[in-house]
């Protein structure tokens, strides 16, 4: 490390990729994570991690061999390449799949100009402690509070046998606060918020710990409303899925069903390509690196198979027009891959993954959307979600409000909404004209993966849980 | 193992040299070999050679932690210096500690010798068995792996434990398809030790696939009612894990937000309900032998005959609260089976639901939960009536534990847990 800038990986892998047979990828990675967590003022996590290594993946007659080592030098490169080849040959010998060679994407060359400036642990501790002190002093009635600060970076160096090269950095920094309050009947309610941050170093986003005091105050006010909150009436209802929740519609409700590997495994999208799956005002895109004229929260320029990343158009004017592919599935469907093959760690193989998936904004104003509902709910925060290959989805909702006669009413306690994506999307009749991104999440699909998701406020009908 | 022991001693020395007053480390190395089946066909053989060093130090009552995946001395030296520096700039907390010395031990569990060819053949046979016995099943993914690991945990109090584990594991995701009809995805996983095992005969594989095929003709439930929910073992595991997280873990006990915070010795569940950590049970594969804190792991009762016996606290949380450190940090749990069969439990239910998978929001700290009952069946007049779609269940975990109305005599063991079917009354079930 020099002046806080992480040293970049040496390129020891080019010479091995150049001479490889069949389709071969060699990837070296290192990852840094710095974490501080205070729970009730107690420092329960004060960790610095560094991991790294190299992997190779070789394609042989329709089967893959992969190997990785947690070391990065020339001997390790040779070793993983050799083992990956042996693994591919083992599979070929056992199965004789005899598939056609893999068609590589056009070679691409990409070198990042990003740098990741590391942060001293003291800076993180001081920042978290100052925020914790602010919450403790201003809101002593809270039953519990926690503050976590995370700053990290993944660096990837990729060579493929057809001449693709990519050197990319994926920094990510954010802080998260959580508050718990006791209700009048002795139960507890809680809320959390991810405050500031994005694809950069700590110093890119944070300076004065009080810069986000208004966000902390807002979270507390919402928690006090939730403390007095009610449970929704279970069943189908008119809802406005707030823009902070809309990313879940893009990612969970639709996104997973149109990942090509899941399509091949029988997802509902398999029989819906080219069909109307949503209201004509609905458009959905998995953005590569630029959306609506700005860089996305987690830009990806080259995927881990060496394909240059482009936007994957998924729903256009309500019609399902495409899937997200890797090289193999793109070859299967006869389409151009858009660079959706992503691997998390150096020991992970690329899978079909989302990048920055969003429902595009419409033309409506949020206040008009609320005014249009006689009896329903406005859902403003989510905690988690899950998809299904049938298109049936679920999101946990941790904050929301009743809508009565076009006006916001009482706050809601924790609940869950569910629906079937291609049914629910057909009920969408209003979309707000703004988009909000959530960049701090991880998607779980064999491996974790940083993803971003976004969307406008969406008016639709969904099934809501009650008590 | 001697090489890892030497590395562990080197790590401790590096930490002391950097200025640590107390230090603990865990040094590990291992290999994983994994066959992947995607969309019903073999796709990948993956070999992962891994290693790791985790470090924890105290300097003047302040803590620092670090992790690297390199066993190289230069990397260890750099990480040790960084770890100690993190502690120096940290905050004092008298409750930080490392494990006390009691006795040192070496543990060996699991498979004696890896046989890749045999394992591959058995995985291929499993795929053929699925295709022939359950033709409506479409395999989304199977991950079949052999995992072998060696580790050493050591600290400056003289603690030194070595562990060698090796086992096989198969996880499957699948759904059933017939014409235009398709089910939700199902999944199961199982750990075992003999590579020459017929995988279809392990755990309750056949039952899981058969039930999935039976889910094809789902109907949305029109009704909303309060009734009995029977949780299948795999689903019960995730619900009980949430109960333990929300009511018994470090954060909620130290912060005092758990509804069970003062309930040790009190009834928190129906008297028929006993929940135990069972890492040493012979049906558990490669269970925990050393706790996360560095003590020899001992199985224990969390709830016995409905009475809360113990929380699941780390040594830090125990020192913070004056309560007892949990004798085990394993997530392998067992529920004591009941006296009646699963079939008899179903026959007693007038109106209810068999919940095989729960897809819901994170339950609130007070235990309120709501979510979708997946791969689930409506129960009416003592019989499984039909599979349901778009059906939600909701309730409160703390209340639910008191409302146990049946525990099956049959248990399912997947190599990590041993669990029966458990029926809970008072669950709200609502259709779309």
Image (tube, rainbow, N blue to C red):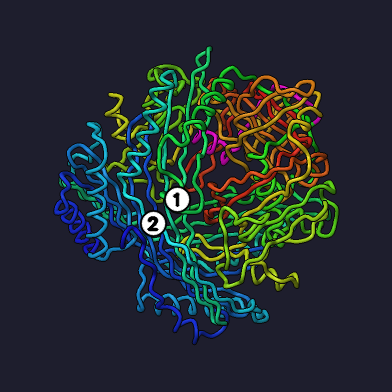
Residue A429 at what x, y percent from top left?
83, 39
Residue drawn where x is 31% and y is 49% of the image: A120
Tell me if I can see residue B403 in this picture. no
Q: Which residues are magenta?
A: B222-242
Does residue A422 sit above or below B309 in this rendering?
below
Does B235 lie within the magenta span? Answer: yes
User: Which one is in front, B365 or B303?
Assistant: B365
Tell me if I can see residue B263 in this picture. yes
**Tag 2: Cα neighbours inside 10 Å, few (<14), some, or many (≥20)?**
many
Residue B283 at what x, y percent from top left?
44, 46
Pointers 2 and 1 in contact (CB under 8 A)?
Answer: yes
Secondary structure at badge 1 equals helix
Q: Which residue is mark 1?
A: A204
Does residue B350 sit above or below A86 in this rendering?
above
Secondary structure at badge 2 equals loop
Chain on which label 2 sits? A
Does A156 lie within the magenta span? Answer: no
């Amino acid at each position: 490390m020099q002046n806080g800038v992480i040293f970049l990986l040496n390129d020891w892998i080019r010479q091995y990729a150049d001479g490889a047979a069949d389709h071969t990828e060699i990837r070296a990675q290192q990852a840094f994570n710095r974490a501080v967590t205070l729970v009730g003022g107690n420092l329960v996590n004060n960790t610095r991690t560094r991991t790294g290594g190299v992997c190779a993946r070789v394609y042989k007659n329709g089967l893959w061999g992969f190997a990785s080592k947690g070391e990065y030098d020339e001997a390790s490169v040779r070793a993983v390449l050799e083992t990956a080849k042996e693994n591919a040959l083992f599979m070929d010998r056992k199965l004789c799949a005899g598939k056609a060679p893999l068609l590589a994407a056009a070679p691409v060359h990409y070198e990042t100009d990003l740098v990741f400036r590391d942060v001293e642990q003291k800076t993180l501790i001081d920042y978290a402690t100052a925020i914790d002190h602010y919450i403790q002093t201003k809101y002593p009635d809270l039953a519990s509070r926690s503050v976590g600060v995370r700053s990290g970076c993944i660096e990837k160096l990729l060579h493929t046998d057809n001449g693709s090269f990519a050197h990319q950095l994926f920094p990510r920094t954010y802080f998260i606060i959580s508050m718990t309050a006791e209700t009048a009947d002795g139960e507890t309610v809680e809320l959390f918020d991810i405050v500031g941050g994005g694809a950069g170093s700590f110093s890119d986003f944070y300076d004065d710990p009080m810069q986000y005091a208004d966000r902390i105050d807002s979270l507390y006010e919402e928690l006090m409303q939730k403390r007095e909150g009610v449970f929704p009436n279970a069943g189908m209802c008119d809802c406005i899925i707030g823009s902070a929740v809309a990313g879940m519609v893009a990612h969970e409700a639709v996104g997973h069903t149109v990942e090509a590997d899941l399509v091949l495994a029988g997802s509902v999208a398999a029989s819906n390509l080219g069909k109307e799956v949503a209201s004509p005002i609905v458009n959905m895109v998995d953005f590569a690196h630029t959306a609506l004229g700005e860089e996305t929260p987690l830009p990806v320029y080259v995927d881990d198979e060496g394909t240059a990343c482009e936007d994957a158009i998924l729903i256009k004017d309500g019609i399902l027009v495409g899937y997200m592919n890797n090289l193999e599935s793109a070859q299967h469907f006869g389409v151009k891959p858009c660079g959706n093959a992503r691997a998390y760690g150096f020991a992970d193989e690329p899978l079909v993954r989302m990048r920055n998936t969003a429902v595009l904004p419409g033309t409506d104003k949020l206040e008009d959307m609320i005014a249009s509902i006689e009896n329903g709910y406005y859902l403003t925060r989510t905690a988690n979600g899950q998809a299904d290959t049938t298109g049936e989805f679920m999101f946990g909702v941790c904050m929301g409000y009743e809508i009565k006669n076009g006006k916001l009413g009482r706050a809601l306690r924790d609940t869950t909404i569910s629906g079937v994506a291609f049914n629910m999307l057909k009920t969408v009749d209003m979309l707000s004209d703004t988009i909000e991104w959530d960049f701090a999440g991880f998607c779980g699909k064999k491996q974790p993966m940083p993803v971003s998701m976004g969307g406008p406020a969406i008016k639709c009908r969904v099934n809501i849980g009650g008590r | 193992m001697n090489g890892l022991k030497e590395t562990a001693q080197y790590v401790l020395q590096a930490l002391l040299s950097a200025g640590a007053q107390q230090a603990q480390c865990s040094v590990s190395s291992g290999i994983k070999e994994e066959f992947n089946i995607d969309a019903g066909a073999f796709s990948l053989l993956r070999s992962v050679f891994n290693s790791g060093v985790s470090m924890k130090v105290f300097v003047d009552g302040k803590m620092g932690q670090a992790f690297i995946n390199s066993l190289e001395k230069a990397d260890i030296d750099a990480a040790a210096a960084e770890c100690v520096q993190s502690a120096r700039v940290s905050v004092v907390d008298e409750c930080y500690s490392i494990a006390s010395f009691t006795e040192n031990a070496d543990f060996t569990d699991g498979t004696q010798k890896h046989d890749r060819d045999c394992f591959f053949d058995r995985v291929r046979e499993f795929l053929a068995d699925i295709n022939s016995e359950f033709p409506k099943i479409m395999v989304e993914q199977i991950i079949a792996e052999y995992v072998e690991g060696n580790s050493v945990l050591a600290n400056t109090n003289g603690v030194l434990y070595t562990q060698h584990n090796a086992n096989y594991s198969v996880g499957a995701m699948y759904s059933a398809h017939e014409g235009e009809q398709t089910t939700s995805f199902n999944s199961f996983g199982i750990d075992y030790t003999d590579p020459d095992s017929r995988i279809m005969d392990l755990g309750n594989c056949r039952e899981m696939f058969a039930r999935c095929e039976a889910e094809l003709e789902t109907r949305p439930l029109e009704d909303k009612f309060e009734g009995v929910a029977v949780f299948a073992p795999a689903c019960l595991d995730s619900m009980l894990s949430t109960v333990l997280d929300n009511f018994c873990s470090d954060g909620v006990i130290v912060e005092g937000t758990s509804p069970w915070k003062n309930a040790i010795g009190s009834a928190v569940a129906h008297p028929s309900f006993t929940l135990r950590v069972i890492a040493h049970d012979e049906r558990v594969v490669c269970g925990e032998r050393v706790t996360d804190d560095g003590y020899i792991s001992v199985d224990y009762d969390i709830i016995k005959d409905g009475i809360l016996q113990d929380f699941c606290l780390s040594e830090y949380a125990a020192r913070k609260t004056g309560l007892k450190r949990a004798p085990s940090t394993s997530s392998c749990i067992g529920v004591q089976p009941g006296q009646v069969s699963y079939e008899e439990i179903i026959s007693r239910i007038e109106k209810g639901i068999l919940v095989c998978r729960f897809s819901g929001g994170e339950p609130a700290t007070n235990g309120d939960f709501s979510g979708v009952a997946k791969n689930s069946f409506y129960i009416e007049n003592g019989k499984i009536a039909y599979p349901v779609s778009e059906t939600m269940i909701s309730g409160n975990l703390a209340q639910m534990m008191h409302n146990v109305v049946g525990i099956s005599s049959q248990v399912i063991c997947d190599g990590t847990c041993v669990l029966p079917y458990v029926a809970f009354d008072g669950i709200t079930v609502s259709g779309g």
